[in-house]
Image (spheres, rainbow, N blue to C red):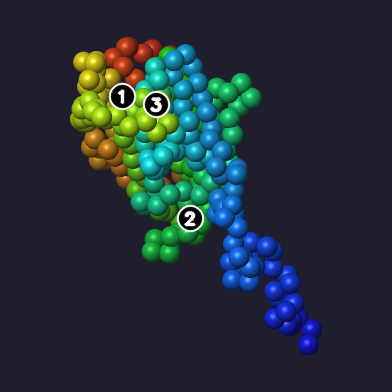
Amino acid sequence: MKGTFTAAEHDASLTEPARARAGDVEVSPFYIESKVSFQEQRLRTLKHGHTFGMFDPRGDISSADGSSEGIYHHDTRHLSRLELRLNATPLLLLSSNVQEDNTVLRVDLANPGMSSRRLRAELIHVNRQKFIWNAACYERILIRNFDVLPHELTFGIEFGADFADLFEVRGQQRARRGRVSAERRSDGSSALRYLGLDGVERVTTLAFEPVPNRLDDARALFELALGAGQGVRLVLRIAFGSRSQGNAVARSFYT
């Protein structure tokens, strides 16, 4: 009958890894099955002066064990987590690229389907643009509702810092470490601190605009009510150290 096939024909159609998983052949000890494409594994990098950032294609910084992602300042990872969440859910990746001069990272994201909120997939568009300049990372986030219906959304930015040096990131274990702490400085800013064994304090400051609806030492939450076709702009400045930063470049970038 057309459209049917025998078990033997099915086995013959399997690739070598598939036959191995099916139990027909012994699995090679050198075989590694990957569930993520090489494109998804490639990191995006930005750099200026003594500061550089390594981000995943979504523009996030994952806090997973063994991850080298982060923003480093003078060879210390001053930010080891930065993840966007829409209604507590990761976003779908549409596109991601760094400009040819390696100055600006541009990322386009969309919502997954959310049946509990009657929201079909890819109706909420999120555009991220970020760059590093003078010991700070600047990011502009544009969120737009392309649905014909209004939606109430919770947009979260989760953050953290381990202040690991490059040797620790590469796997070296320290017998002793300094003390990490965090504080909410104001309604729109939080600070992550590390007092090292050398007596030097290292500080990462995150400033949000507009002021989040809720902010603590690890997360900023924005409650958004977007009508059909409406959008909102959020900006984030992450500064490293106590050095004062000029905002002229950032203001022109955010507009």
Q: Which residue is mark 2?
A: 112
Residue drawn at 33 percent across, 36 percent down = 159
Q: For mark 3, does the 10 Å Cα neighbourhood hold few (<14), some (14 to 19), or many (20 or more) residues?
A: few
**In the image, what residue type sits under mark 2?**
Pro
How far across and how far down the image is residue 87, in percent? 37, 52
Question: Quadrant location of residue 213?
Answer: top left
For marks 2 and 3, give the CA distance: 37 Å
How far across and how far down the image is residue 65, in percent? 38, 42
Nearer the camera: disc 2 or disc 1: 1
The residue nearer to you, when weighing 75 against 207, is: 75
**In the image, what residue type sits under mark 3?**
Phe
For marks 2 and 1, give the CA distance: 32 Å
Q: Residue furthest bottom?
A: 1
Give the answer, above or below, for where 170 lies relative to 251. Answer: below
Q: Earlier along the polypeptide chain: callout 2 or callout 3?
A: 2
Instruction: State the SS at label 2.
Output: loop
**In the image, what residue type sits under mark 1?**
Thr
Q: Earlier along the polypeptide chain: callout 2 or callout 1?
A: 2
Residue drawn at 43 percent across, 38 percent down = 67
Q: Which residue is mark 1?
A: 204
Pointers 1 and 3 in contact (C-beta within 8 Å): no
How far across and how far down the image is residue 78, in percent? 35, 26
Q: Which residue is mark 3?
A: 167
